[in-house]
């Protein structure tokens, strides 16, 4: 019998949106996940949220050494306009498990718990469930997004270093951006290798190179949000 623990070790998530989410005690704004005392995470619910209409969701992942706030802030400025639910967990260690420990483990479990919490209480648009991140968070977003393409419809990877998958499921669309002057994760061994590899696997790729460093220019995040959520 395949257990949830077996799935997590493969980078597979078990949480799925509910057809009839609970509508009790709906809160808007920034809220703590309430799943951990030391390294928790946040949910942001737009004041425009209406439980009668499904909302798009983006799971956003911080970079190395970062905190959940950094993940939340990656798309926070667009959330109200797009009626977007943001979920921003913190990694269990200073970066994500596949990078810190060479294996999927505690971060997959924590992310699964965070998504289960949101799916339980909010009406989610299953046509627009994205995972994204910056730097190490982008690498992890690619890794989990490609592994769980039966859940995530879109991946937004801002300056990724690599991706690692044990299983490929589904065919999510993939947005990748990278600065040509990036000295932290140089573009040549990173995105310029990742993109051709994914194209050979027949993923729909939107790739943006820009004249910048290890960063997300506003023009790039605007393109990502329009590509993903219209």
Image (spheres, rainbow, N blue to C red):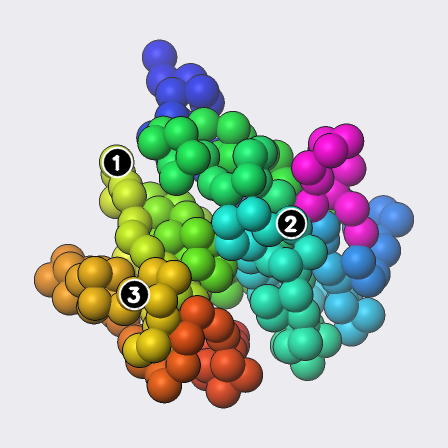
Q: Secondary structure at mark 3?
A: loop
Residue 218 occupies quadrant: bottom right
- Ranked by sequence position, the earlier of labels 2 and 1 is 2
C-alpha span from label 2 to label 3: 23 Å
Describe residue 154's horizontal placement relative to residue 221 as left or right. Answer: left
Circle 1 residue:
166
Describe residue 134's horizontal placement relative to residue 33 as left or right. Answer: left
Please provide the residue range marked out in magenta: 31-41
C-alpha span from label 1 to label 3: 25 Å
**Looking at the rendered structure, which numbered label has been put on residue 116?**
none
Describe residue 212's horizontal placement relative to residue 187 as left or right. Answer: right
**Residue 166 position in % (x across, y down):** 26, 36
Q: Nearer the viewer, residue 53 or 42?
A: 42
**Looking at the rendered structure, which numbered label has been put on residue 67?**
2
Q: Residues within 10 Å of mark 2 (few under 14, many from 20)?
A: many
**Looking at the rendered structure, which numbered label has been put on residue 186?**
3
**Residue 164 position in % (x across, y down):** 28, 43
Query: Are the residues at dot 1 and dot 3 in contact (C-beta closer than 8 Å)?
Result: no
Q: Could you tell me which residue is drawn at 47 percent across and 53 percent down?
A: 137
């Amino acid at each position: 019998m395949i257990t949830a623990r077996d799935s997590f070790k493969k980078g597979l998530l078990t949480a799925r949106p509910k057809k009839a989410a609970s509508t009790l005690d709906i809160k808007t704004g920034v809220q703590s996940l309430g799943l951990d005392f030391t390294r928790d995470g946040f949910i942001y619910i737009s004041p425009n949220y209406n439980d009668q209409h499904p909302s798009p969701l983006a799971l956003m992942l911080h970079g190395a050494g970062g905190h959940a706030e950094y993940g939340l802030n990656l798309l926070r400025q667009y959330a109200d306009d797009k009626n977007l639910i943001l979920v921003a967990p913190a990694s269990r260690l200073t970066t994500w498990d596949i990078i810190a420990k060479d294996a999927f483990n505690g971060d997959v479990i924590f992310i699964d718990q965070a998504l289960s919490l949101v799916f339980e209480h909010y009406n989610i648009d299953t046509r627009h469930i994205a995972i994204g991140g910056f730097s190490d968070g982008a690498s992890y977003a690619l890794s989990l997004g490609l592994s769980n393409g039966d859940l995530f419809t879109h991946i937004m990877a801002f300056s990724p270093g690599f991706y690692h998958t044990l299983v490929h499921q589904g065919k999510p669309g993939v947005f990748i951006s990278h600065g040509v002057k990036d000295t932290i994760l140089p573009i040549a061994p990173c995105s310029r290798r990742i993109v051709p590899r994914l194209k050979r696997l027949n993923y729909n790729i939107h790739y943006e190179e820009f004249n910048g460093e290890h960063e997300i220019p506003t023009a790039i995040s605007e393109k990502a949000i329009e590509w993903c959520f219209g």
